[in-house]
Image: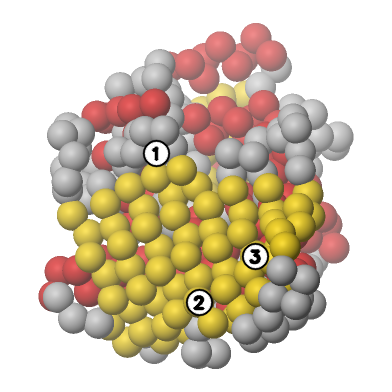
Amino acid sequence: MKTLVVGYGSIGKRHVKNLMGFNQTQVSVCSKNKEVLQLGKKGIKTFTTIEQALKEKHDVVIICNETSLHVKTAIKFANKGCHIFLEKPISNSLKDVPPLIKIIKNKKLITMIGCNMRFHSGIKLMKQLIDKKEIGRIISVYAENGSFMPDWHPWENYRISYASSMRLGGGVVLTQIHEIDYLYWFFGKAFEVYGLTGKLSDLEIDVEDYAVCLLKFKNKIIAEIHLDYFQKPSVRNCKIIGRKGQIRWDWENNHVQIFKNKDKKWVTKNFEKKFDKNKMYVDELEYFFNCVKRKKTPMNSIIDGLEPQKIALAIKESSKCGKKIRIK
């Protein structure tokens, strides 16, 4: 299967490296990044412009370029009949998404949003426990993701990354959309959002580095999400409170623990001493390629991925106008 990776930043490099271990996958890369020239030594075909890449036939395109270019790039390859794996977030706007969806439906393309946390063992276990109603009806949720952005890729200048640039579609709300996505996966659509965002740190960026929001889901669940670019040490966790107990997950230890009111004690459901972060990236690509082969719609297609995107943009809008936003 001929697979083109568009973009060769940190996530593009990860996908290329992982794809090299896939059987029956012929990989090529399109990027302005001069590092792609080194890929030729590994037998990987490279393109420096999208126009060059469009001249050749590809079965699958994995889009990892700047957020603001996602949809424009996807439309070009969708018109060529390529199945599309689009890294999160879909875009920094919903304006150009309807034309893309029209092409996807007309050409019956398989598409998927790259939200790798759905393939994280801890997050998957939490969903299983929720679906089994282990703690009864869910009442409230707290999710947090905070880390110091310059530490993400110390070898790169954080000031020029897409995550730090308004023009490129950055900002903590869209860049860290994972928490929004997995809560949507857990609980379905949110219909009301109140958000507060701002630039609070001394980081040299022109986007928000802080966001806190309240989401009201249709099943009466209230979720609070905290996101930031400046915490040291980094923190990532989630706590879910139900009528019959609690579930909590912590990234650092990859603990999923459950407390049942009747038992009056915490029980650890999983513990991985050597958590392999890369496994969830491999798993999501394997899942996507299986969907392509079987012509099966993935659980988080571009159409389904619009819901977390609407929530993220509503958070930003709410902060701007100072009012809660209802999501249609």
Residue at position x 15%, y 34% in the image: 202
Q: Which residue is mark 3?
A: 247
Mark in the foreground, 1 or 2:
2
Is 98 in front, or is 299?
299
- Image position, residue 300 (x, y; %): 62, 66
- Image position, residue 247 (x, y; %): 65, 65
Nearer-N-terminus badge (2/3): 2
Mark-to-mark CA distance, 1 and 3:
23 Å
Quarter of the image where one finds residue 264: bottom right
Residue 188 versus residue 115 in the image, above or below: below
Quarter of the image where one finds residue 12: top right
Looking at the rendered structure, the kind of residue marked 1 is: Ser
Q: Which residue is mark 2?
A: 140
* Label 3 environment density (alpha carbons within 10 Å; few <14, some 14–19, many ≥20): many
Looking at the rendered structure, the kind of residue marked 2 is: Ser
Nearer-N-terminus badge (1/3): 1
Mark-to-mark CA distance, 1 and 2:
24 Å
- Image position, residue 47 (x, y; %): 51, 28
Looking at the rendered structure, the kind of residue marked 3 is: Ile
Residue at position x 33%, y 78% in the image: 193
Is 54 in front, or is 28?
28
Q: Residue 147: which numbered mark, if any?
A: 1
Q: Residue 302: which numbered mark, if any?
A: none
Nearer-N-terminus badge (1/2): 2
Say which element carries label 1: loop
| Colouring convention used in this rendered image of the protein | secondary structure
Quadrant of the frame with the C terminus: bottom left
Is 162 in front, or is 216?
216
Say which element carries label 3: strand
